[in-house]
Image (spheres, grey):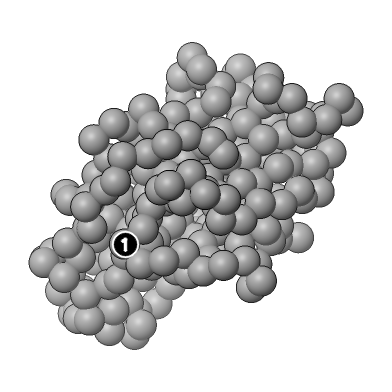
């Protein structure tokens, strides 16, 4: 099951200079990408000036303690800010075992206008879920920033103290050369290209697909990584999410 699918004011962000980035050599093989490991390089431009703006609603939840404390956690870089090239990206988060039956998803723009919101069913199982904006949701605009919020809804309904998380997403356009490289690349190599060029959402979604298909460990086992964990876990660990890297993907 894939879940298809307000938050705070945000500073305006300057566009990421995708066109000015140094693209990865298109001749780089999948083996070379695996040997180096798939990690995330934060974008050098377009970063928020106040990284607390996308902080989790669960104050004081250290990333290394997530699995022990049972915090809802967004699968995001440590400043909870990420770039996407998609009109309707997928938002991933870790949810501990819970009595909540629904989640409330909200997306607001830079002016705090509602862009999209919905209530979605939630399994009570612990794990990682993905929430994808549906086709009837408005597309994210290029070079615009949005804040997304996910709140768990319990028996008492939506409350100010309901557990949830927030993050920030900005849609950008790829440099034409990089776009051609990604179009022709296998899925794991796409993830590497996205990660090296600071495109968080597509790097994560590509690796999530490999993990759900049972391909992450198979790829890692044939690579020359010093510590050949599967590439999904390696990627999450590169941004401090090792505490939940081995949790199951539920949809």
Residue 231 rendering spot, x and y as whole percentages: 42, 53
Q: Is residue 183 visible?
A: yes
Q: Where is residue 160, by image quadrant?
A: top right
Q: Is residue 149 left or right of residue 174?
A: right
Query: What residue sits 61% from the left and 56% below the top?
Result: 116
Give the mark count: 1
Closest to the observer: 168 or 160? 160
In this picture, residue 156 sits left or right of residue 190: right
Residue position marked by numbered label 1 in the rendering: 143
On screen, residue 13 above or below 3? above
Of the 4 image quadrants, the one containing the N terminus is bottom right
Q: Residue at x 56, y 56 (%)?
A: 115
Residue 236, given in percent of the width and then of the height, sits at 43, 43
- Where's residue 120, x and y in %? 77, 50
Q: Is residue 97 left or right of residue 81?
A: right
Work out which quarter of the rendered image holds the C terminus and state it: bottom right
Q: Pointer 1: residues within 10 angstroms few (<14), some, or many (20+)?
A: some
- For numbered disc 1, what is the local secondary structure? loop
Residue 49 in the figure: left or right of residue 103: left
Residue for point 17% across, 62% down: 17
């Amino acid at each position: 099951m894939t879940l298809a699918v307000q938050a705070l004011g945000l500073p305006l962000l300057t566009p990421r200079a995708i066109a000015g980035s140094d693209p990865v050599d298109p001749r780089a093989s999948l083996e070379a990408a695996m040997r180096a490991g798939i990690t995330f390089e934060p974008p050098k431009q377009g970063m928020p000036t106040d990284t607390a703006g996308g902080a989790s609603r669960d104050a004081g939840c250290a990333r290394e303690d997530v699995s022990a404390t049972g915090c809802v956690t967004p699968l995001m870089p440590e400043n909870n800010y990420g770039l996407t090239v998609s009109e309707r990206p997928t938002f991933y988060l870790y949810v501990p075992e819970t009595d909540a039956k629904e989640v409330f998803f909200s997306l607001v723009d830079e002016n705090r206008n509602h862009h999209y919101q919905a209530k979605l069913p939630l399994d009570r199982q612990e794990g990682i879920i993905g929430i994808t904006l549906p086709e009837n949701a408005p597309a994210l605009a290029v070079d615009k920033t949005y804040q997304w919020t996910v709140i768990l809804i319990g028996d008492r309904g939506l409350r100010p103290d309901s557990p949830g998380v927030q993050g920030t997403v900005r849609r950008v356009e790829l440099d034409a050369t990089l776009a051609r490289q990604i179009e022709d690349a296998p899925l794991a190599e796409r993830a590497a290209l996205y990660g090296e060029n600071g495109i968080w959402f597509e790097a994560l979604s590509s690796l999530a697909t490999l993990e759900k298909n049972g391909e992450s460990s198979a790829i890692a086992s044939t690579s020359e990584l010093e510590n050949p964990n599967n590439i999904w876990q390696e990627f999450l660990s590169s941004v401090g999410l090792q505490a939940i890297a081995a949790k199951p993907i539920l949809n």
